[in-house]
Image (spheres, grey):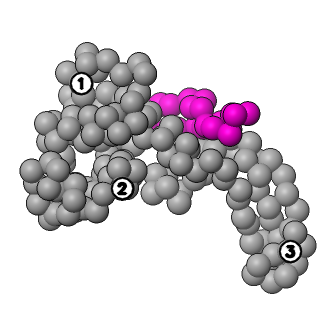
Amino acid sequence: MKCVNCGGRMTTRRADWRYEASGLRNVILLGVEVSRCASCGEEEVSIPAIEGLHRAIAQTIVRKRERLAATEIRFLRKCLGLSAADLAKHMGSTPETVSRWEHGATSMGVTADRLLRMMVVRQEPVADYSLGTLKDVALRAARQTQLRLRREADNGWAVAGAA
């Protein structure tokens, strides 16, 4: 394999990869193929079944008991395939409010937090999501969830850990 940056030879190995392209800093993919150019240091990662990966991340985020962090709100909106204006319409809010949530300028209210989670759950059902979790949501301050995901043999992704 040749480097797209300099044309040098790339070597591939399995490694853990911080998946920052998701917009979430705390997502680590376990044992994915990472290619590195010996000449210029360029790195490329192979992430198969990315839609399944995003579903696994979204399902883990909506199960957490703390309020949604700004970056998680943006990630979930994008997983729903909605623009900020569309999410605002669905939630009875304004695009400016959604922007403030996503940039951390304003905390998302408890009701909006629950509604966004339910929208995600409805689009991609989570088998073990109990309504009891909803009443506990948003009682703690917002923080990003750290996720570790492992590639499964069936071309899917499984959560190896969340904290």
Q: Which mark is residue 81?
A: 2
- C-beta proximity under 8 Å, tags 1 and 2: no
Q: Is residue 133 positioned above or below 40 on the image?
A: above
Residue 156 as seen in the image, left or right of residue 93: right
The image shows residue 112 at horizontal and vertical percentages of: 16, 42
Q: Which residues are magenta?
A: 145-163
Instruction: Look at mark 3 in the image and give the residue it sits on.
Output: 2
Circle nearer the N terminus (1, 2): 2
The image shows residue 123 at horizontal and vertical percentages of: 35, 39
Query: Which kind of residue does numbered mark 2 sit on?
Result: Gly
Residue 156 magenta-drawn?
Answer: yes
Instruction: Look at mark 1 in the image and give the residue it sits on.
Output: 134
The image shows residue 30 at horizontal and vertical percentages of: 68, 41
Q: Alpha carbon of mark 3 to alpha carbon of mark 2: how far?
A: 34 Å
Mark 3, residues whose alpha carbon is within 10 Å: few (<14), some, or many (≥20)? few
Asked if residue 71 shows in the view, the reply is no
Residue 146 magenta-drawn?
Answer: yes
Circle nearer the N terminus (3, 2): 3
